[in-house]
Image (cartoon, rainbow, N blue to C red):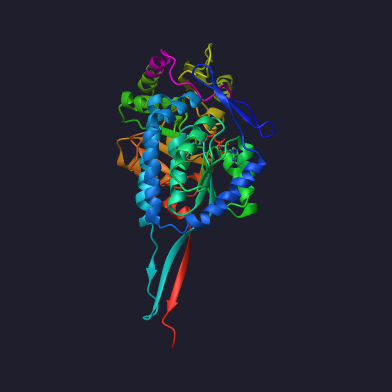
Amino acid sequence: MSTTFGDQSLTIVCPSNGEDVGTVRSAGPAEVAAAVAAARHAQESWAQTSAQERGRYLHAMADALEREKERLADLNHRETGKTLEDSRGGVDAGISTLRQYAELGPLHRGHSLRGELYAADYTMTRPRGVAVALTPWNDPVAVAMGLIGAALVTGNTVIHKPSERNPHLGIYLGEVLSAVLPADVHITLTGGPQVGVELTRSAIDVIAHVGSTATGKAITLEAARTGAHVIRENGGNDPLIVDRDVDPQWAAGQAALGCFANAGQICTSVERIYVHHDVAEPFIDALVTEATRLNSSPGQPLVDVSHRDHVHGHVAAAISAGARALTGAEIPTGPGAHYPATVLVQCEEDMAVMAEETFGPVAAITVVDSFEEGLALGAAGRYGLAATVLTTRIEHALQSAARLHVGTLKINGVFGGAPGGSAQPHAESGQGFGYGPELLDEMTRTSVVHIEAGRS
Ligand code: NAD
């Protein structure tokens, strides 16, 4: 992938086989300005439609995604290396999110209060205006549909800037959605970070960013100048804490899922493991067996070679600082951006593989002497997205809930959660609600209306 604002192009190669996927034009400053003006103009009439009508449009968007699922999944697969099955799953998740917001939009309600006997006070919400959605490549359809659906159903118009790593998918998604919406209610702009920067410096009302922490911080600084409302769902460094009393084979299965699914490129992937020494040996053996099994076939690649360099950089630095690789840890020969499932032991807290987001198929392990030690290490650090604890002890589950300052705590299961679940990421993992019914609050402003009887 190469990109500059000046030459206005993005070239994508398939990370599975190194073949050329294609080149697309990147938007320039004039197109950004035109998109903001068009979205602003369209918002006036879009805000006049009823929430119910906007909900019907969201159902039409979901229907359009159903029809185009295969092509969208294929583009996702070719641009990012996500498996076809998971790419289809991402479109399905996007469809169901749109349908949820289609139904929740008309139910988004305020409060009424009673002060004086002959007076009424109530709250009402109104759209913020023009929303910009800046989305990542690792689950591009599902994430975009949440932000776009919530913004549209509450009466905002949206400018979507998909990741520079999946521009063909982003453009096609935009065409599919715009075909069933009024003109300029939803606009797609393609390009690299520069297009995102230009958008965040424009006169817009909401910036919804799902992506890395470094980008989220830069966006927050820009928004301090413009006054735009910022919603940030950013990176994590999620710990997995394995207690002494769990079945080590089962725990290793959970760890493998958490570390290696989607080649470790999930915001809530397990990034660091603290395992109690009583179960450490069978746990590590089982995890290495599973990693070796996964490595016997090429599997899912990383998104591109530059990201692979980042992942391998963390692994290589850990090994030179004293960690030991039990499997993986070598860049394979051949085309594409493959990287093996890797198990590292004797990891230390100051290694990047433990302290930062690696976002690759790496299980970085520290053996601890007690649950309390694992909990203290898991609670440390600058991120606060999610954490998993595997334990049979209710007191340890409750201690974890009290001491792990994360948006999502999972007890005895690395992934999963109820539909519509939403939490605020803590610390450097973001701010606001990027998902669930609460995202409708983020996309709106609340006014209070006070009415008195008056005199005639
Ligand atoms: P990224 O922040 O680099 O890119 C996301 C979007 O922001 C892209 O469209 C990009 O072009 C744009 N962008 C980049 N720099 C910008 C800037 N300075 N100003 C404005 N826009 C800018 O993130 P990524 O690499 O695409 O995605 C991977 C990251 O996303 C990981 O850190 C992962 O944990 C995180 N993520 C978080 C969640 C969550 O819900 N917390 C979900 C998915 C991914």
In this rendering, the answer to whether 128 lies above or below 265 is: below
Residue 26, x across and y down, in percent: 61, 34
On whether residue 303 falls in the magenta region, the answer is yes
Seen from the viewer's position, the closer of residues 295 and 199 is: 199
Residue 404 visible in rendering: no
Horizontal arrangement in the rendering, residue 100 relative to residue 326 (left or right): left
**Ligand 1 located in image quadrant:** top right
Residue 124, x across and y down, in percent: 43, 64
Total count of labels: 0
- Farthest residue to the right: give it: 6
Horizontal arrangement in the rendering, residue 293 relative to residue 43 (left or right): left
Residue at the spot x=62%, y=39% of the render?
195
Residue 100, x across and y down, in percent: 35, 46
What residue span does the magenta drawing correspond to? 290-306
On whether residue 133 falls in the magenta region, the answer is no
Seen from the viewer's position, the closer of residues 121 and 43 is: 43
Point out the image quarter for the N terminus: top right
Residue 67 visible in rendering: yes
In this rendering, the answer to whether 186 lies above or below 23 is: below
Point out the image quarter for the C terminus: bottom left
Seen from the viewer's position, the closer of residues 128 and 62 is: 62
Residue 399, x across and y down, in percent: 38, 44
In this rendering, the answer to whether 183 lies above or below 299 is: below
Query: Residue 382 occupies which quadrant of the picture?
Result: top right
